[in-house]
Image (cartoon, grey):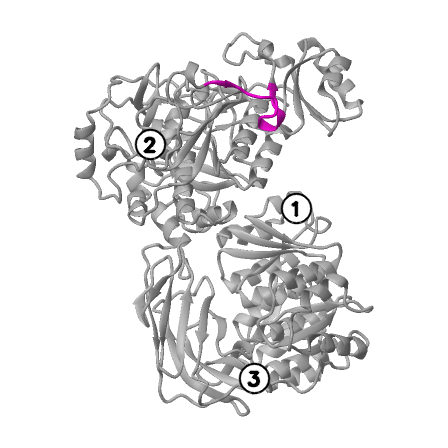
Amino acid sequence: MLKLLKLLIKDQRIRLKNKRFLCLGIALAFFLTLTPVPMLKTDTSTLPNVNTGVASQNVQKMPKSASAGTQVNPNLNALEGQAQDLTGRLVVKLSPGTSPEAIAEQVKGQIARKGPLQFMTLALDSSRINEVTEELKTIPGVLSVSPTQKVKLSAGGTAFPVADPHYSEQWGLSKAEVPKAWNLGATGKGITVAVVDTGVDANHPDLQDNLVSGYNAITGETGVSAAQDNNGHGTHVSGIIAAELNGAGVVGVAYQAKIMPIKTMDRSGEGTDDVIADGIVWAADHGAKIINLSLGSDTQEDILKEAVQYAIDQGCLVVAAGGNKEDSTNLTTITYPAADPQVLAVTATDENDHLASFSLNGPNAGLAAPGTHILSDYWKNESGYATSDGTSMAAPFVAGVAALVWSTQPDFSADRVRQVLEDSAIDLGSPGRDSSFGYGRVDAYWAVKFADQPESLPASANVSWAGGILQGGTTTTPATLTVPSRAFGSDPTLSPKVEITTPTGIAGLPSGVNPIGQPVSVALGISTSVRKQLQLSMTPDYKTFAPDSSHLFYIYRWSGSRWLKVGGGVSSNTVTVGITEPGIYQIGSASIPQGNRLAGADRLETAIQISQAGFPDGADTVILARAEDFPDALAGVPLAYKYHAPILLTNSTSLSDSVLNEIKRLNPQQIILLGGTGAISRGIEQELKNMYNITRLGGANRYATAQQIAEALGMTGEAIIVNGDNFPDAISISSIAAQNGVPILLTQSNNVPSETNQPLRKFSVTGTVAVGGEGVISANTFASLPTPLRLSGQDRYETAAQVLSAFPPQGGITFLATGENFPDALTGGVLAALNSTDLVLVSPTGLQGKEKTAIQSWNGQKVVAFGGKGVVSDSLLSYVQTMLQ
C-alpha cells in the first residue's frame, strides 16, 4: 500500500537561537587544540564541478528515461501541502509490457506517477478504492495492488539549539574513536552517500563542497539545489555523515565523503513509499555506494521492499534508522525499512553506552550508534546548526563509518563492509547480537583496523583485537601464525602475548612418520578458549628431506602423551592448518595410502576402517554417533576436527564388539556422544562411563543437538546453514566447515528454528553460507540469515559441485562417497578435513556434468572411495582416478 513515511528524529521542533557562523580562524584554532587529524583542510582538487547557487540556476526537468522511467503528474503532486487526501491513492505493480495508461483508463483513474520498478500510483475518488482494488486484481498484467495508509511523524522530547558549534560537543566522535580512524588515513574520500530525506541545504558552508548532483523525487527534478532542504532534517543527517573539515561549525564522521541529496520528504517531514522508492532507485543508479534512510513505517509494502532490494542488487549498502518510541503510537519494535533483514538497522545510544530511552529495539537490530544530543548542521530558513535526538542521528553515524571503511578498501563489496562494521562493534548488553544493540556500538577505529591487512608482528608480540601475523620458528623451520580479528573474544582491550618459540626435549613423531625440520611451540597467553581458528603455516628446509610423490606432509601436535595429526595431507613445501590450542607442533611426512577404498561389511565397520586410516596412533577424543539416523551427527564433523577425533557409529541400544575394540585401540581420554538417549541409549553411556570420561551433546531435536555442538565448538563470526532434513548438502560441506572451524547449523525450509537462531546471535555470526536451493532453504529464510551466501544447484550433485568449485582442495587425496546414502561420508568427513580436501558425492550412474567440470583440474590427486563396491563401483573409481591423472 502507499505509505506515508516519517522521519525518525526524536523531535521536530528545533529552534536555532543563533544562526550566525563562527569565525573560520577562531573555529579552526579551537578545533586543532582538541585532536590531531591527518589533514587541516578539505582537498578540493578532485571535487566535481557542481553549482551550489540558487535553485533557478541548477534545476533541470527530469527526462522521461531518468530514474528507471519515473514520470510525475504535476497536477497531482501536492505532497508539500497538507490538504491533499492521499487515501485516494493505489500503488499498482505491472508486468513488463503492460500499459499504465491503458490500466488507468480501464478503471477510470489518473496516473499520479509511474516508475520505478514497473510500479505506478493511481489517483482515485476515495469512495472507489475497494471497488477499483478488486477490479485491478482481475486485469491481466496487474501483479499487485496496495491501498494507501498514513503514518504519523515520530515526535516528542526537546531539541537543544547551539549558539557556537564546537567540536568538543560532538561526543559521539570520541566515543566511537573516529579521530583515531582519521589518523589511520580514513576520511571517506571517494565514497558517495545518498541521503534519502528532506533534501540538503545546498548553501551550507559545512556541506556545499561535499555535495554531488541529487534528485527531487517529489517533483522529478535533478541537480543539487533541486533537492534543497526545507525542513532541516536532511541537512542534519548529512552533516553527521560528511560535514567538511574546514574549521567552521562541525565535522562529519567521513568528512571527505560526498553527499548525494535525495529529496523524498516534504517540509513537514512526511513522504510516501512510492516517492521514497523512486529516490532509492535513482540513488542506486547514479553512483551512491551507501544509502541512508532516517525514516520509517510500521509496515513495508512491495514497492519499498523492491526498491531496497534493487539498491542492494546494485551493490549499495543500505543503512536505516531503527525507529523511536512515541506516545502517540503503539510501536514496540524496529520499524521498516530497517526491519528488512537485508538493511543494516541502527539503534541509538547515549553518552554512557546505554540504549537511548526513545530507541525502539528488536531482533533486527544490527548496530547501535550515538543518537542523543547530537550536534550537526541544520537549516531553518537559513543555514545553521542544532542538536537533536533520534535513531535518525544514529543511522548516519553508521553510514559515515561505513564510508571510512570503504574509502580505505575500495574493492570491498557492500556485504564485506557491513561484516567489518558488525565484527568490529563494541559488544554491549547480552553477549553476542542482541535486540538492543545488535552486534554492538559501532567503532570507527576498529572497523578500519579490521578491514586492513593484519599487522605483521615478530615471533613474540602482544596481539590486538584486530589480530596480526607472527613470524617465528627457526632457520630450518620458519613458521607463521595468523591470528584473525576477535580471535580472543569480544573485549577490545585484550591484547594477549602470543609467542612462537623452539622447544627442546620433545619425543619423536610416531613410527612410520618422518620428522621434517624442527618443532615449534605456540603460546597464546590467554586463559579462555580461542573464538576463531588460527592459521599455522610451517615451511621447513627441505634440503635435508626432499619431497617425493610417495609422501604427503602433515602437521602434528604433541598432546602431552602422544602426537595427534592436526591436518595437512599436502605435497607442497608449506603446510597450513587451522589450530585452536597452544602447544608443540611439527611437520612429518607419511606415505600416501596404498589402497583406493576404505570399506567394511557395514556402515559401522566402514567407520572403523576410516578411523584406523586417519588415527593409526590413537586419539585423545572419540565422537560416537548413531548409525541408523544421521541428523544428530550432521553437525559433528567440525567438532571432531577440533578435537582431532574420529567419528564412530553405533546402534542406538548396544555397542558392537568391533566398535568397542576400536575405542580401546584409540585409547581416548574422553568420548563425546552426539544425540539424546533416543539416539544413544543410557545403557551405552553407562557402559562407556565405567572406562572413559563421557560428555553427551544431545537436545530435544536435531536442531537443538546442532546447537549444543556449536556451543562446544565455541567459534564466532561465521556459520554454515543446511536443511535439517536434507543430508547430502550437509555432507558435501562438512569437511570445508571443519577445516575452517565453522559450525554447521540446521534450519527448516521456511523457518529458522529458535535453536539455530540462538547460536547465530550468541556467537555474533555476521556471515553465513547456506547450502542448498530454495527448495530446501526458502528465499525468505535465506534473506533472514546474516549476510548470506548461497551455494546451490538443481539437485544434490549440482549443489556439491558448487561447494567443490567454491572451496577447491589443497591436499593430495580426493575422497569419493555415494550421494544416495550418507553414513560413510559422514564419518569420512573428518578424514577429508585432516587431508585438506573435499568430499565428492557421486551418483550410482557416475559423475554428474558440473561435478566433473569442478574436479577435472585437480591433477595428480590420489583417489580413495568410502564404502564398498555397491555404493562406489570399481569402474567409477577407476574413471575418476584416470581423469585426475
Percent x, y of residue 713? 52, 64
State the image quarter where residue 684 is shown: bottom right
Residue 309 at what x, y percent from top left?
A: 59, 37
Is disc 3 surrounded by few (<14), some (14 to 19) or many (20+) residues within 10 Å? Answer: many
x 71%, y 82%: residue: 596
> Which numbered tag is attached to residue 393?
none
Say left or right for 370 vs 683. left
At horizontal 33% and vertical 63% (from top left) the residue drawn is: 463
Q: Which of marks 1 and 3 precedes in the sequence?
A: 3
As shown in the figure, which amino acid type bears the numbered disc 3?
Answer: Gly
Q: What element carries label 2?
A: loop
- Which residues are the magenta region? 59-71
Quarter assignment of residue 140: top right
Q: Mark 2 points at which residue?
A: 243
Badge 1 amino acid: Asn
According to the picture, the residue beneath numbered tag 1 turns out to be 751
Q: Position of residue 721 (x, y in %)?
A: 62, 55
Contact check, label 3 and label 1, Cβ < 8 Å: no
Location of residue 511 with respect to 530 vertically, above or below: below
Q: Nearer the viewer, residue 354 or 280?
A: 280
**What x and y, as percent, mark residue 521?**
38, 78
Per the model, the C-alpha gap separating discs 2 and 1 is 43 Å
**Helix, strand, or loop for circle 1?**
loop
Q: Nearer the viewer, mark 2 or mark 1?
A: 2
Q: Name the residue under label 3.
A: 618
Decide if residue 825 is in sight here.
yes
In three-dimensional space, the C-alpha distance between marks 3 and 1, rounded to whole angstroms, equals 41 Å
Q: Does the magenta stretch include residue 515?
A: no
